[in-house]
Image (tube, rainbow, N blue to C red):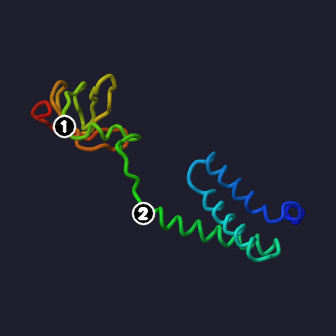
Amino acid sequence: MEQLYATLGGWTWWIVALVMFVLELMAPGVFFLWLGFAAVVVGAVDLVIDLTWQLEVGLFAVLSVISLLVSRKFLSGRAIETDQPNLNRRMLNHVGRNFVLEQPIVNGRGELKIDDTIWKVRGADAQAGSWVKLVDVDGLVFVVEPASGPDV
């Protein structure tokens, strides 16, 4: 580290920040961004105050931990708003709709065809061809209740 700092001087932290920002672009999540901000702050401090490389590394470590903790607290409670909230849980798009049973529900288990897919269902026993309403999703199984007919 001492040779690197001796060679690059004050540019060291700006290069570290650039590397962290590039890593942030390539890695999933938001982690290297905060390390990059810490490196930028250390680079700015290095312009004003002449610190030893050991103190700068220590400052970088402390600022990295602080920025990670602050960002975690700031970002953890925020829900991401989207126009497709069920994108990765597409079964939830069918909840509340009525369908005809493909197979009878016997002992609480049966099958239902939606478009070209057969789904497992759980609910009160019912005959094949009867209408059911999807009320919930439990894993990969729809929870159903009897319905009087198609969606109204």
Quadrant showing the N terminus: bottom right
Where 147 falls versus 18 (above or below)? above
Q: Residues within 10 Å of mark 1 (few under 14, many from 20)?
A: many
Where 94 falls versus 64 (above or below)? above
User: Residue at 25% across / 25% down in the picture?
Assistant: 103
Rendering coords of residue 151 (x, y %):
14, 33
Q: Looking at numbered disc 2 in the image, what kind of residue is underneath it?
A: Gly
Rendering coords of residue 60 (x, y %):
71, 69
SS at circle 2: loop
Q: Nearer the viewer, residue 23 or 144?
A: 23
Q: CA distance from mark 2 to mark 1?
A: 34 Å
Asked whether disc 2 touches disc 1, contact meaning CB atoms under 8 Å apart, the reply is: no
Q: Residues within 10 Å of mark 2 (few under 14, many from 20)?
A: few
Left or right of 134, for residue 38: right
Q: Nearer the viewer, residue 61 or 136?
A: 61
User: Residue at 68% across / 55% down in the picture?
Assistant: 20
Q: Earlier in the sequence, mark 2 or mark 1?
A: 2
Q: Which residue is mark 1?
A: 133
Mark sitting on residue 104: none
Mark sitting on residue 77: 2
Where 123 falls versus 13 (above or below)? above
